Amino acid sequence: MNRRKFGRTGFEISAVSYGGIVSMDDGQSASDRYVSWAIDRGVNYFDVAPSYGDAQEKLGNSLKPYRSRVHLACKTGQRMRAEAEKELEGSLKLLHTDHFDVYQLHGIASMQEVETAFGPGGVMELMRELKEKGVAANIGITAHSEDAALRALELYDFDTVLFPFNWFMNMEHGMGSRLIQAAKARNMGVLCMKAFIERKWENDEERKASAFPKSWCKPIDVADVRFGEAAMKYALSLGVDTLIPPGNYASFSFAVDHIDECLKHPLNDADRRFLEEKLTQVRGMEFF
């Protein structure tokens, strides 16, 4: 698989990365198969979080034979240092490692969360120390609020950012454009979640009845190759370094199987017109 420079981290990472939710809830043998398949196809960046059910345990076991060959990213959803330290200890143990290649302040959704994380006793005290000690080679941020992410970038020189650079939300609302500009200006590594998302689930019943109950939003149907590729191409056109598909094996394997085509034939006018037509079908719906 194509490897791409990952900002200033010094890493070259695969154009598709493995989201830990793929390993969640499917059992250890399934996780082992998923990870082995990914490794065989050149995936070398794996991302997980404590909030992903049993994903840390399953992925940690699956990665044991490969840890020295891959870049492992983890996260903390805590905003205060004390709670984050306990969470970190558990993550390192479950993932059978003594360090993370990227450790991320996870799920920032408001200005208040930013202020808490950077305030007295906040989690950023710990994250700065982890980088100084080498427990975290790089410090990143993940967010769903562009304003909050931009505020965090003003307060700390993060190495990476993970954000939903999605065709729907960028075309309709310009979401992510300011953030990727700021990230590129800082030479940050840019990870893209939700590139392969069509819309928000209408309700829990639709999600549970679908083939993708682990996915927090409705993925594009993998049978719709043109839609899937156009959405991936759109995210790549924004300048992201890697795509992290939704948390199911079908979406992940689609992205791996089709990434070379997307890189060989980037987004063009026909793809844009196609996505504009798709946009008319989902306009007015919520994304997340």
Image (tube, rainbow, N blue to C red):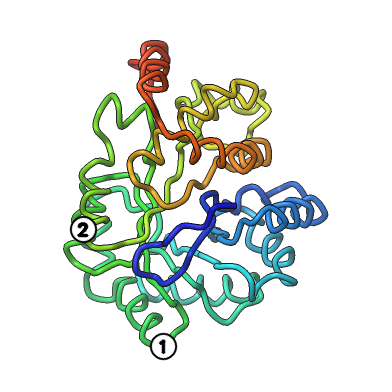
Q: Which residue is mark 1?
A: 133
Q: Secondary structure at mark 2?
A: helix
Farthest right residue? 29
Residue 114 coordinates in the image, percent (x, y): 25, 59
Q: With respect to residue 115, does 10 lie above or below?
A: below
Q: Nearer the viewer, mark 1 or mark 2?
A: 2
The percent position of residue 115, horizontal first and vertical second, equals 21, 62
Q: Please name whichever residue, 86 or 257, is drawn nearer the observer in this view of the structure.
A: 257
Residue 108 numbered mark, or none: none
The residue that mark 2 highlights is 185
10 Å crowding of disc 2: few (<14), some (14-19), many (20+): few
* Residue beneath the point at 45% across and 25% down: 199
Q: Please state which of residues 24 and 119 is positioned toward the viewer in this rendering.
A: 24
Residue at position x 74%, y 52% from top?
A: 37
Q: Earlier in the sequence, mark 1 or mark 2?
A: 1
- Identified at 77% across, 57% down, the residue is 32
